[in-house]
Amino acid sequence: MKERLGLILLGPPGSGKGTQAKLLTEKYNIPQISTGDILREAVKQRTELGLKAKKFMNQGELVPDDVVVGIIEERLRKEDCERGFVLDGFPRNIEQAHALEGILKKLNSQITQTINLAVGEEELLKRLSGRRICRECGEGYHIIFNPPTNGGICNKCGGELYQREDDQEDTIKARLAVYAEQNAPLIKYYQGKGLLHRVEGKGSIQQIVERIITTIEGTRRDD
């Protein structure tokens, strides 16, 4: 029998982590654990940690590590994680990585593979700077990959399309620099544990997920 999967997806903004995580959940029938999603769910459910997180979110501040870690632990304790999980957006720093290791030890679980989606800056700029959003209905487009039929007009409602401030080139470069700085210790940490696998993140969605699956299956142990 193949080992239970504990996957972490690493990758810069625009690398497609969320898309790939969803495909991996379908392939392996395990849940995607996205930090943003579970924070919003905890707030919605008005859990003790959710209410703590809400105070920071309402003020536009980052939710502290101890609250995020607590919410991650609550999620990992749920029954659907017994088969495994895909972590998307967590851990974000070395402190969170150490906390995650402590949680998994308590749960008699572990990380089995850490996939680092590698995408060059030029490609990331093309992906992120090309995004456009409808002012009226919020429909998303991309000037290269999913262009509107009629220039800067939404196909769905006829509203004006605009580029978000954080999708402008200077802002993207700043976000990528911050990510690289924060991510370097994580890369080193999981590399040191022999869990890091670099996967080329350029190509079609299907090509990329096939590379990830090949990597997972090639490094997965039989129990």
Image (cartoon, rainbow, N blue to C red):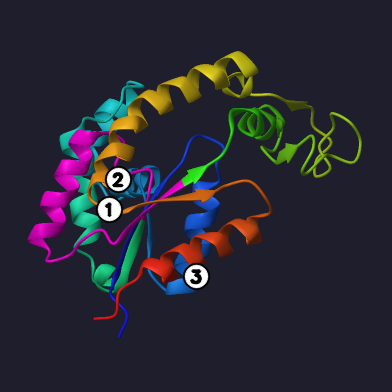
Q: Residues within 10 Å of mark 1 (few under 14, many from 20)?
A: few
Farthest residue, direction right: 150
SS for callout 1: loop
Q: Quadrant of the C terminus?
A: bottom left
Direction from residue 188 to residue 34 in the image, left or right = right
Q: Position of residue 57 (x, y in %)?
A: 33, 29
Residue 80 to residue 131: above or below = below
Q: Position of residue 22 (x, y in %)?
A: 50, 60
- Which segment is the magenta one? 87-116
What kind of residue is marked 1?
Answer: Gly
SS for callout 2: helix
Q: Residue shown at 22%/47% (left/top)?
A: 71
- Res 69 → quadrant: top left
Considering only order in the chain, which callout, 2 or 3, is on the residue closer to the N terminus? 3
Q: Which mark is residue 194?
A: 1
Along the line of sight, the residue nearer the viewer: 138 or 6: 6
What kind of residue is marked 2?
Answer: Gln
| Mark 1 to mark 2 CA distance (whole Å) | 5 Å
Q: Position of residue 130 (x, y in %)?
A: 72, 30
